[in-house]
Structures are given as structure tokens and as C-alpha cells.
Image (cartoon, rainbow, N blue to C red):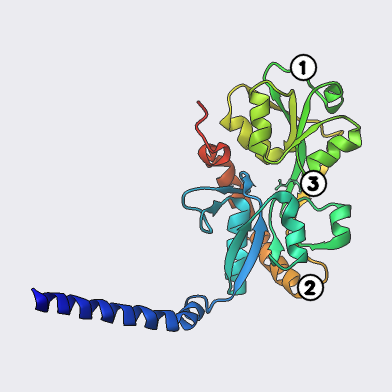
Amino acid sequence: MKKMKKILALALAGAMVLSFAACGSKDETAKDSSSKETITFGTNAEFPPFEYVTSSGTIGEFDGIDMAIAKQIGDDMGKEAKINNMEFDSLLLALDNGQVDAVIAGMTVTDERKESYDFSTPYYTATQVMIVKEDSDIQKASDMKDKKIVVIQGYTGETCVQDLGYEYEAFKKGTEAVMELVNGKCDVVVIDSATAEKFVGDNEGLKIVEDPDTFEAEEYAIAVKKGNTELLNEINASIQKMLDNGTVSELSAKYLDVDTEEDASGSDAE
Ligand code: GLN
């Protein structure tokens, strides 16, 4: 018995030495496994079908059109694409302080954003739309005037409603905004078209109202720090390839079709 204990103790000691040794070589191991350099993309994974959290996504738990594009950009650059998920409002600041190399977040190129950041070749065209209850009398943007409007903070939808001069309430997440509508606490949510389609598909009794005279076309592109031409060129080469060989259209069709209900709402619809 004593002998047994001794053997066990020795084995334990041996294991500890081994694990210390493993600790000692941790740096090297880390270098080995990531000998592939990384490119870190900032996103806000609250925006299906472009980015959302799921059990097994394209990059870790993150999936969607943008995540597949980010992964391909990484592959094309010979780098491992990583995702840093944060609030939409923090994304461009994260570029400033070097937390992320690029932002991919269904982000619309606007003149204001272009003043401080560089944008890639656009890869998707969208527009703002209105999500309303099926029996709503809202038919065009001006019908929102005296209605309770909800937008998502920092999205171009907020700017659009501001420009119209209407009062609104801003939420941090699209899912929260849509829940307000489902629960009858607001009359309309202004949000990007493809994401609206997802939310309407995931919730009963809602419909989309478009008003192309009021809401202009918006182009999504990847943002990098101003002057980071080297990275921008590599990103652009990769995007151009994906536009030319049909990857972007395939991804759009695929993810518009994927049921992201659980991922988008974080709970069952019932
Ligand atoms: N396209 C909108 C914007 O750029 C919303 C993007 C998003 O929520 N991820 O503001």
C-alpha cells in the first residue's frame, strides 16, 4: 500500500514537472499554433444575417455573411481571422486604439465616417426600411411623423430618422427594438433591409414597409484606420475576388435562408 502511494506520489510529481515544462514552453507552443499571424475584425454580432452568435459559427461562435467574408479575407492574407465582438458604437473607436485591425459589421459607408476612416470596396447594397405590425397604417416614411419610432443607437437608421426631424427612442440591440414592436410599445422600427427581413421572418405579425424616395441606397464596406493602405489593398483584393467569383452573392443567398431565429432573438419565439 505504502509502495502504491509512493508510486502515485512519483507519478504526480512527474505530471507536475511535465506540466511546468509545458508552461515553460508555452510561448513557443503559442507561437507554433498561431505561427499563422492573425487579423482581428471588430463586429457587433447582433445583426443577422451579417453577424450573429450561434453554437458553431464560421469563426468561433460567430456566423453570418460578414463572418464568412472575414474568414476568407484572413485565408487570402494567410492569416487567422479573429473576431472582437462589441457594441456597434464602439467599433470605430476600437480601430483608433488598435484593438481591432478592421471593422466588418454591415457598416454603411457615410461621408461622416469617411472623414475619419478608410473604407474598402463596398460588398453589399442595402437601404433602411420600416418594420411595422401587419395591421399598421404606415405606408411611407412621412406616416411615421406622429408615431412611436424606435431605432438602434448609432445605426444609419438613427441618422435617417434624425434627418426627418421625428422623435424616436434608441435601443442598443435590434432584437430589443423588435420586441418593443411585438409587445405593442412602439409603432415602427427603422432598420437595415436584410436584417429587417430576418426579424420579420422570426416574429409573427410583422411586415416591412419600404420607402425608396426617402431612404437612399446604402453600401456596406469594411473600415480600417485612416491611411492603412497596405491592409486596405489586401482587403480590397480579397473582396474583389469574392465579388467576381460569386462568393458574396452565394453567401448572401445562403445566410438570408438560414434560420437564425434562436441566435437572433436569444429565445424561442413562443
Ligand atoms: N448599416 C447600419 C450602419 O452602418 C447598421 C449596421 C449594423 O448595425 N451593424 O449604421
Q: Which amino acid does label 2 sit on?
A: Thr
* Quadrant in which residue 2 is drawn: bottom left
- 89 or 252: which is nearer to us? 89
Q: Name the spot of residue 228 as percent of width and height, x first.
A: 78, 72
**Type of the residue with mark 3:** Glu
Gap in angstroms between the C-alphas marked 1 and 2: 48 Å
Instruction: Identify the residue under disc 3.
Output: 218
The reply to whether residue 197 is visible in this rendering is no
Residue 236 coordinates in the image, percent (x, y): 72, 66
Does 177 sit left or right of 64 as displayed?
right
Which residue, given by chain and number where applicable, does mark 2 sit on? 229
Residue type for callout 1: Asp
- Residue at image coords 84%, 28%: 141
Tell me if residue 119 comes above or below residue 198 in the rendering.
below
Local secondary structure at mark 2: helix
- Give how far across and how far down residue 65 sits, in percent: 61, 51
- The circle on residue 137 is 1
Quadrant of the frame with the N terminus = bottom left
